[in-house]
Amino acid sequence: MKKTLFDKVWDAHVVESIPNGPDILYIDKHLIHEVTSPQAFNELEQRDIPIFRPDKIVATADHNTPTLNQHLPIKDDMSRKQIEELTANCKKNNIEFYGLGHKYNGIVHVIAPELGITQPGMTIVCGDSHTSTHGAFGTIAFGIGTSQVAQVFASQSLLLEKPMKMRINVNGTLKKGVSPKDVILYIISQLGTNSGTGYFCEYAGNVFREMSMEGRMTVCNMSIEMGARGGLIAPDETTYAYVAGREFAPKGEELTAKIAHWETLKTDEGAVFDKEYDIDANDIAPMITYGTNPGMGIKIGGTIPETIETSTDKALAYMGFEYGQSLLGTKINYIFIGSCTNSRIEDFRTVAGYINGKKKADNVTALIVPGSRQVADEMKAEGLYKIFEEAGFQVRQPGCSACLAMNDDKIPAEEYCVSTSNRNFEGRQGPGARTILASPLTAAAIAIEGKIIDFTQNLN
Ligand SMILES: CC(C)[C@H](C(=O)O)[C@@H](O)C(=O)O
Ligand code: SF4
């Protein structure tokens, strides 16, 4: 039978199939962070169940961590307790933990790929919806709830119904200034935030084949924002080159053998998907969102479309926008360049390339938050800190930061923030804050102008 990439990885991990029921799926890697692990640890302790395979778990602190003075005790009580609890739980259970100050600390979805923990053909879970990011490696990766975190702790497996399969093909040539973030924002704006519900989504076509691993991670990261359980892209030479040489990646003959296997992880010609979409790359332009879900996106120079959905009325009232309005010229006081969607070295190289020699507008507070200590170190080594600081941007320490208001980095009420993160929900960046999602390049250009502009005309 012809199989999809998803079928191949899934089938290779089925421990047992219950006739007409769910499968028991083996999990290769379990990533954890401070927000969704405490109850799962408690549950196991209460039931006196040991953690089955602690060596398959990697922990980091990212959501509640401050991005200034990380060497000092965390001031916020709640946040400090969360991190202390994770630290103690990892110690007690022999789990590898990259806490604050550790050279491998950072956002969970940034560190696992950069350390070579994420590899093609694996199953990876985390109590975090953006676990879909790891699908960029041809991995079945998805977010799980806290009770499932406990299930994986106890058994290294999960009881799951096999999801349906969809494929999105994007072929053609991307226009100048169009980033991977624009590709996924465009897809979600066209297909809607429920289009992926119940599905795992494979991204195929020359646009993804030609994309860097960083770009593929940005795309897969936002699969969850169209409702999909996860997204994935077939591994290829770009993937192998990224994985090779990383800290925990296979080496030498083991790597050669693995690559031979990874080569087989492609959807067979003629394999059938439950649904499929084709998108012309030429239709995609730099995107921004105007509403309170990631599907409410338009091309930068576009106007807010009329709709019959009453939820849009509420979204526009929250955002202070109107139907038919163009966002060009909207004054922007906050810029956030970071999050597991766009805080990798390539993102900051793009931003630095654009702002080098320029200055941010006076009204703008611009935050640059690397996704990990390693990204921060690379930025320093490449001289990017200097470029950002000279342009008046604040460079912070790694963490989820202003992506969600779980730490000190919050956007004031009613202020617009052009953000490279993945969610623009009400209050996501602080009570009353208004988030406009965009690519790092778009955010950089807006930081320089202090208002929304169509920067594509400035590109040479
Ligand atoms: C806190 C965590 C559970 C949450 C998620 O699952 O995604 C967060 O990372 C987010 O982005 O909203
Ligand atoms: S950076 Fe944002 S989206 Fe990513 S894990 Fe952290 S809070 Fe979630």
Image: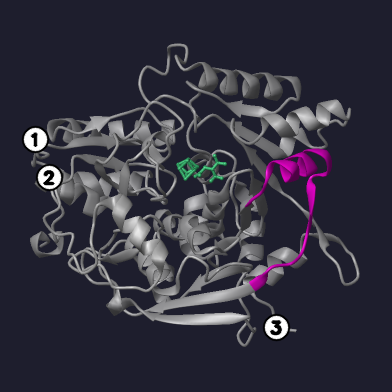
Specify the label residue 450 is tagged with.
2
Mark 1, residue position: 362
Q: Residue furthest top?
A: 72
Disc 2 residue crowd, few under 14, some 14–19, many 20+, Cα 10 Å: many
Q: Residue 162 lies in magenta, yes or no?
A: yes
For marks 1 and 3, give the CA distance.
Answer: 58 Å
The mark lying in front, picked from 3 and 2, is 2
Residues under labels 3 and 2: Cα distance? Answer: 53 Å
Going by the numbered disc 2, the residue's amino acid type is Gly
The image position of residue 96, as x and y in percent, is 65, 29
> What residue appears at the point 74 percent right and 42 percent down from the top-left corner?
147
What span is colored magenta in the figure?
143-164
Q: Which mark is residue 2?
A: 3
Q: Position of residue 377 (x, y in %)?
A: 36, 31
388 with respect to 439 (left or right): left
The reply to whether the magenta stretch includes residue 180 is no
Confirm or reject: label 1 Cβ below 8 Å from ligand 2: no
| Number of residues whose C-alpha sits closer than 10 Å to that of mark 3, classed few (under 14), some (14–19) or many (20 or more) | few
Please tell me which of labels 1 and 3 falls first in the chain: 3
Apparent side of residue 441 relative to residue 88 in the rendered image (left or right):
left
Reading the chain from its start, which is encountered first: label 2 or label 1? 1
